[in-house]
Every structure is written in C-alpha cells, then in structure tokens.
Amino acid sequence: MRLYNSLSRKVEEFKPINPPKVGIYTCGPTVYDYMTIGNWRTYVLGDLLVRVLKYSGLQVDYMMNITDVGHLTGDNLGDADFGEDRMEKAAKRETKTAWDIAKFYTQDFIDGYRQLNLSWPKNKQFCKATEHIQEQIELVLKIQSKGFTYRTDDGIYFDTTAFEAAGNKYGELSNLDQIKAGVRVKINTKKKDRRDFALWKFSKKDEKRQMEWPSPWGVGFPGWHIECSAMSMKYLGEQFDIHVGGEDLRSTHHPNEIAQSEAATGKKPFVKYWLHGAFLQVDGGRMGKSLGNAYTLKDLQAKGFSAMELRYFYLTGHYRKQLNFTWEALKASQEAYRKLKALAAGWQGEKSSKVTNLVFKFREAVENDLNMPQALAVVWEMAKSNISSMDKRKLISDWEQILGLDLLTPVQSIKVPEEIKKLIKNRETLRKQRKWAEADELRRKIMTAGFTIVDKTI
C-alpha cells in the first residue's frame, strides 16, 4: 500500500512500525458549534484510511480527540496563543456553561459520526482534553525538564530556539520558515520567537474561567497543541504510524505536536506518516460562517439530502485535492448513489470465479494513496458489466468494507405522492413516444421533489 506522506512530501510504501499493528490518530473536532461539511470531509478521510488498512489485513488501533478546552480564537489569525477560548465564547453566545456547550456539541458530533458510518475509535471512546489534564501537565513537565520552556506573564511557552540549538529541526512539516511577522499572523510580543507556542496558559487574574485547573505553574488551562501529543502518546505510544488531519493543521498545529513530543522523548521520531486532507470549497470559493456557506449535515438534510449521499460525494474527489461543493454536484451524487443502491438491491447470491480483474482493479485503487474516485469508477464498471448478479452481490459486499455507503441495507418503503405518480406515468408515456426532451423535463421535476428514477431500456 502507498500513501502520500506530508513529512517527506512524496508517496511512500506504507510500512508499519510494528506489523501487523497500526496506530492511527486523527485530530478531532473543537466542540463549540456544529460541524461543517468541510470538517466532515477530514473525518471521512480518517475513516477510509482505517477501512483500507483493515481490508489489507492489518490490526488498527484508532484514536480521535475531542477538543473541549484551550482552542483560542487567535488561531484564525495564525497564532493560537491569543484570543478567547472557543468554549467560553460559545457559552456566552448561548447563555450556557462551557461544560454544557461541550456536552451538547460532542453529542451532535457523535450523531453525525454515526450517520456518516465512520469507523469508531478504539473501544468507541473519543479522548477528551478535559479528561486528560494531568497527562498534559506531566508532558509539559517533561519538556520543561529538558530545558525547552520559558515563562511569561500569561503562560509557559515552548522555546523553539532552544529546541533547534539542541540539534533538532523545527517546522519540516510546514512552511513556517516562510511566514513573515505581521502577514495574517498577529505578533505576540510576549514570545521570544514568533514560532514559540503556549504549553500552559494562566487564567487572567481579573477573570474567572469556567474551565481551569491547578498546575505547578499556577491556575490555568492547557495550550491547544499539547492535548494531541499527550493523548496520542498515552494510547498509541511515544511513536506510532499515522497522524491524520485537515491541511489547515499542517502550518502550526502539527509541527508543534512534533516539536513538543520529540522534545519530551529525546529526538525519537513521533509519527512516521502524516496525511492531510484538502479543503472543501463551496461554489468555487472559500467556506466560512461569515459567508453563510458553512453548511452542516442538518442544512443538507433540510434540503432532502442524506448523510450517505454526502459520503458518496466525498468519494468522488481525491482527499489531497480540493473538492468543490455545489448543490448541483451534491444532487448528482444523490442520483448516482440512489441508482447504485437500487441496482445493488437486485444483486443476490454467491460469487463465481469470473471477477478477478475487477477485484484487482478495486484493490489497486484503494491502496494507491486512497484513490476513491478510481475505486468508484471500478464499482460502476462492475455495476454496468454483464457479470451475474451473484458476482455483483459478493463484490459489493466485500467493497462495502471500505466504501461504507450502506448499499446493501434494504431501501425503506416510501409513500409516493399521487402527483409524483402522475408525473412518472406521464413521463413513461413520453419516453415510449420518443419525446426525450419532454420526458427529461418531467424527470427533473421528479428529482427536485426528492425521488430518483432508475430507467429500464425501452
């Protein structure tokens, strides 16, 4: 199997550290609001990776965090060490406690996770930052004992200059060396170096936080980056195989994870392979709440789209390439998904011995850096082929281990309104008369109403 490693910037043959076991960690959500369809694309990437590795016969330990404290709003400006805690800000917005905010949006995340049929972390447990405060404090103490920290009036910071002076490299994963002070990056004058980052932040003396803890340095809360190192090393060890995240985490969050982890363990390589998913665009541009296009699963469902139809849409693009979301593109995916599901419902029986080439092509696609568009092409090649329905049933049952599209679950009976039945009947009449343009217009009306038609040859 081959994967693109962001650290080496090339596609590499995947070789587990301790085969057949594989440790994977995906940076999970900050639970202060509903997840957007951009967020969900990253979590589908983690799911696909887990599925493909298991399909290849490997034993996967999968972990994902829940950030429920310490992620500051300054991250939007390039420096996660200033601004307001997102949990505290959301609490003010909704007049709830920060703990209630975390609980509500964590549950909403889990509900969406289930709808998208994503692979569960080990023991179906997400690791929460607020439940691992002691582990984070202990990791900061280790880094401090190695001489890689300093104190300011607002926290304990990681000293990148000292880290490099000790013979370590910082920022190989990203383009941090190209970032200029003042270019979208707010300058924090408390830092010795603009690349330094907070390991522990102090609570402000004139302000009572809802989420704060005692520490050897004073009452406060952990910096955003430290949680992922502390929790991933607790559950996967000081070295593990693959770390997954969105491409936005490549600039600072992931390089900081590497630095603080290797500072604590003594130059031991932290993670062997880094996978980053590309951004999801909307109508060819940026997605943003201020733009009104940061759509959620609920927004899609309100327009008649299901989570499985969104999952199918994600599979139409390679994870390392930006995927452009439009309602028209999602509609096309909905039609393709419903057609494929309807076809699969008619495939019955056991596999014969005529499908070796299709099996090879599908496996070649998924093991080539998770090339899901190519894998979907093989699925449709199979669906349109003249092999028996028995063969098709067995193949799709096998491939569903990776696709996760719920294709073989029986379609629930839906009552078709009389006006839709009338449109269908009129359309059939037009098709028999070879009046294709008029028939297509009725088909569009039927599809707009949320129904899919699978035509038989006339």
Image (cartoon, helix red, strand yellow):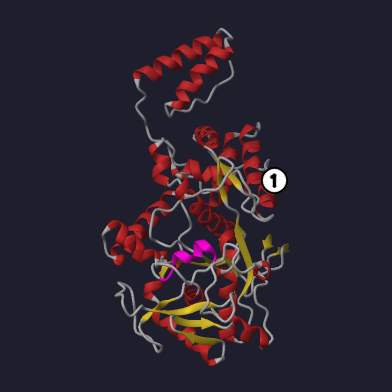
Residue 54 on image: x %, y %: 57, 60
> Quadrant of the image for the N terminus?
bottom right
Observer-nearest residue: 373 or 258? 258
The reply, left or right, for residue 265 in relation to residue 12 is left
Residue at point 45%, 81% (across, down): 155
For residue 42: magenta?
no
Observer-nearest residue: 287 or 99? 287
Residue 122 on image: x %, y %: 46, 67
Across the whole image, how many numbered discs are drawn on residues? Answer: 1
Q: Which residue position is annotated with label 1?
A: 356
Asked if 56 appears above or below 142 in the picture, the reply is above
Three-letter code for the amino acid on which mark 1 is drawn? Thr
Mark 1 is surrounded, within 10 Å at the Cα level, by few (under 14), some (14 to 19) or many (20 or more) other residues, namely: few
The answer to whether residue 306 is visible is yes
Q: Quadrant of residue 167?
A: bottom right
Observer-nearest residue: 449 or 220? 220
Residue 337 on image: x %, y %: 52, 37
Residue 283 on image: x %, y %: 56, 40
Residue at point 52%, 87% (across, down): 150
For residue 74: magenta?
yes
Query: Which secondary structure, mark 1?
Result: helix
The reply, left or right, for residue 298 in relation to residue 182 is left
> Quadrant of the image for the C terminus?
top right
Image: magenta residue range:
70-78
Residue at point 57%, 74% (across, down): 256
Asked if 46 appears above or below 260 in the picture, the reply is above
Observer-nearest residue: 111 or 28? 28
The reply, left or right, for residue 252 in relation to residue 97 is right
The answer to whether residue 22 is visible is no
